[in-house]
Image: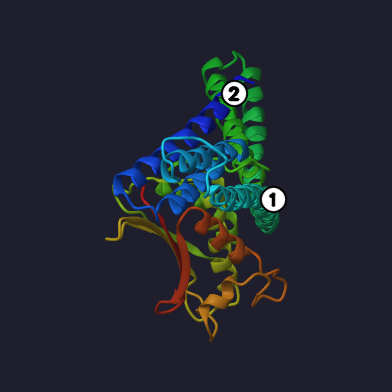
Amino acid sequence: MQKDGGRAIRGYGLAILCAAGALLVTQSLRNPVFPTPLFFAAISISTWYGGGIPGILAVLFGTLALDYYFIPPERTLSLSKPETPYLLEFALPALLTCWFVKKRKIAEVSLRQARDELESKVQERQAELARVSRMMTIGEMGVSVAHEINQPLMAVVLNGDACLQWLAADPPNLEEARKTVGRIIDEGTRAGEILRRIRTVSGKTTTQKAPVDLNALSVEAASLLDRELSRNHVVLRTELARDLPSVIGDKVQLQQVVLNLAMNAIEAMRQQSDRPRELCIRTVRPGSGGVIVAIEDSGPGLPAGDPEQLFTAFYTTKEEGFGIGLSISRTIVEAHSGRLWAFNSGHGAVFQFELPANG
């Protein structure tokens, strides 16, 4: 209530200031042609920024000012002056101007609200689509995930069996048993970290932008690909730039982009047998002031045609593909004020994205 009262007072004050300003300018110019346009401008400004009532107040002030200062005999207020019809010719259009400006303001506010609601819904749908893509990526990595979880669990079982043997000895070897328990804890922690990473990538979370280290993000993404790399006989190489500045972004979404591009590269080399299968994750700090992450493979390269079509939604060159991974990846990168593109480089293709550096 108090806030509305303050807004109303500011609107009335604006109407008075605009009308007074129009009056001062016309008096200083000493030109009888100028009063009407300037008062119309004052009425429009008062209505647009103050509202309908301040606009009407500006109409009233303008009418009185014209009667008092410009219609002879001057310095008097009277409706019986010979040129009083001029006041009606001013007041009626002024009121219509006030009404039209008010309607235009209401229409613009409504349009802005509708646009904000539409943008919010679009962002929600994009977030849902991105989550579906993350789940598809995790599904494709199912064998790798199972293998990663299986390794620490088997280690826990083996270390647990060894611990029982040390305790069953005569006398019990408590020191070795203690070391074995420590290894069990380490392997359990490792399994929990794997699950945490998978849950982070697949979880339904809102966009949370913060400083992100792309070197650390690339290493963590590569760790999720270990089994997939081994299963497809792909050698991973990382070339990480030193003193790489951070970027402002959502870590989960950016990691999804790296995973999508890396999984595509591995799939592109799946049928390759004439040369080694190599995947390189590279970070670069170009002279443009941004940060680049590049995924390079030694596969057959990009198909003939415009590389841009690869980023079109539902366009795919894979028999079982959906054609949304690259489209979503570009949407994520562009939402971070970056760009994603692809090109051929020697033997293979390069997909890379650039983001503005933090600071």
Question: Residue 27 in the image: x percent, y percent?
Answer: 34, 44
Q: What's the residue type where badge 2 is placed?
A: Gly
Instruction: Tell me the kind of residue under disc 1.
Output: Lys
In the foreground, 180 or 144? 144
Q: Which mark is residue 36?
A: none
- Which quadrant: the C terminus? top left
Residue 59 placement, left or right of 103: left
Q: How is the image coloured?
A: rainbow
Res 250 visible: no
263 to 23, vertically: above or below: below
Q: Earlier in the sequence, mark 1 or mark 2?
A: 2
Name of the residue lying farthest toward the left: 287
Label 1 sits on residue: 121
The one of 89 and 285 positioned closer to us in this rendering: 89
Q: Which residue is mark 2?
A: 5
Q: Answer left or right for 39 relative to 152.
A: left
Please state which of residues 216 and 46 is positioned toward the viewer in this rendering.
Answer: 46
Q: Contact, CB < 8 Å: mark 1 with mark 2?
A: no
> Residue 99 in the image: x percent, y percent?
64, 48
Q: x%, y% of residue 287?
A: 27, 60
Would you place residue 182 above or below residue 62 in this image?
Answer: above
